[in-house]
Image (tube, rainbow, N blue to C red):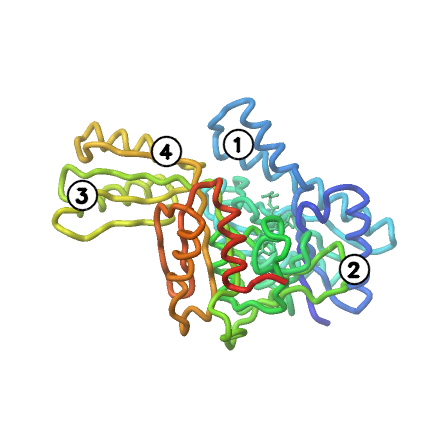
Amino acid sequence: MAIIVQKFGGTSVGSPSRIEKVAEQIIATKNQGHSLVVVVSAMAGDTNRLVELASQIDKNPSPRELDMLLASGEQVTIALLAMALIKRGYSAISLLAHQIGLLTDNRFNKARIKHIDTNRIYGELQRGHIVIVAGFQGMDSEGNVTTLGRGGSDTSAVAIASAIRAKECQIFTDVDGVYTTDPRIDERAKKLDYITFEEMLELASAGAKVLQSRSVEFAGQNKMPLRVLSSFTDGTTDGTQICYEGEVDKQHPVTAIACQTDEVLFTLEATEHIAQLRTRVFNDLAEHAVEVDMISHHLSEQANDLNFTINRKDMVMTDNLCKDLLIDKAISRYQCLKSLSKVSVIGNGMRSHSGVAADVFSTLQENDIDIHLVSTAEIKLSVLVASDDGEKTVRLLMTKFNLNN
Ligand code: ADP
Ligand code: ASP
Ligand code: MG
């Protein structure tokens, strides 16, 4: 009997009636003869509500206590879903992450999964239970509650599926698959039947919220069959399959476009040798767990400025580090530009097609959109634009690269 892992996101379990609906869907899979582990997020809006509640007590709350608070959202939904299944005559058991030995490191708010003890899950499955696990949360080696970063239930699901060697991990959400861009930004976006693992990884790390990027990393490491589906459409589509072999579409250079908001650009002017400054800045940022996104640095005798972007949530920390650099006279001045968005075009076809950069730059120039920074990778090109231009840039590039329905 195959084990299937199904994950239901916040909107899928956003109300008691939605939870009842999800219970029906789970029962349909169970009745096909599968063993089922179900990973659930908090009800839509609940995690945001908890973050807001914390900020009313402290704008910069203790990371440990924040995780203790945020993890509570998922405890609510697992219990309600188990109740809905039991009411329908199915045996189900809800479990918190620590009850399945889901061990993480101790980086509160962005912990990484290190190990999952599969005994408890296997035992419950053998007893015939549908196992309902709280997503997003874990436990460090000292028994503290941790969380996996926003959107982390996707990662819980893929990690559990990999640990118990499930046949498939199905991510149920409020869209019926991965689209050529976020359908909320461009309603003309097309659903993709397949997307390669590499493209999905780039798309997720470029800001497409549909899967947390670490979940895609996990899936890739374990070649876990992964599918994104809607919990709102009663199996009318097969969703989007993440595939590990072969190039799905070599015809088009671009497969999808992502938009990451809340980017902040720092520009530092060095007084000392730029190489020394570069080492110090990126060491300092790493020590404080600030994730740097784009970096631009011109290697020449004359150049003495260093540009990089970070997420808005790390702005205060980065600003403080820059102030220290000023005090130490390592830089003569620095500038911080807020309200930026990063638009990324992604596609395996970019390996064999040239001219994507030219198309992006000409489209933006024709529409008077300024580019603050550019970065490229093998199958991705990103441009940093003003937030006000972000969605417009996506729509223009969707048309340019024929990604509409
Ligand atoms: P869940 O609560 O189920 O985890 P999320 O809100 O985290 O759902 O992710 C689903 C959302 O991701 C969609 O509603 C959509 O707005 C957004 N999204 C961003 N990029 C894409 C994309 N390329 N394809 C589909 N959805 C996307
Ligand atoms: N509830 C968490 C969040 O809102 C985790 C998740 O939904 O994946 O980020
Ligand atoms: Mg999500």
The mark that comes first in sequence, 4 or 2, is 2
Is residue 51 placed above or below 258 in the rendered structure?
above
Amino acid type shown at disc 4: Met
Distance CA(mark 2)–CA(mark 3): 58 Å
Say whether marks 2 and 1 touch (CB < 8 Å): no
The mark that comes first in sequence, 2 or 1, is 1
Say whether marks 4 and 2 touch (CB < 8 Å): no
The mark that comes first in sequence, 3 or 4, is 3
Q: Report whether residue 266 is seen.
A: yes
Disc number placed over residue 234 in the picture, else none = 2
Question: Count of labels shown?
Answer: 4
In the rendered image, residue 15, in percent from the top left (x then y), is placed at 76, 41
Disc number placed over residue 317 in the picture, else none = 4
Amino acid type shown at disc 1: Glu
Label 4 CB less than 8 angstroms from ligand 2: no
Residue carrying label 3: 304
Q: Residues within 10 Å of mark 3 (few under 14, many from 20)?
A: some
Residue carrying label 1: 65
Amino acid type shown at disc 2: Asp
Q: Nearer the viewer, mark 4 or mark 2?
A: 2
Say whether marks 3 and 4 touch (CB < 8 Å): no
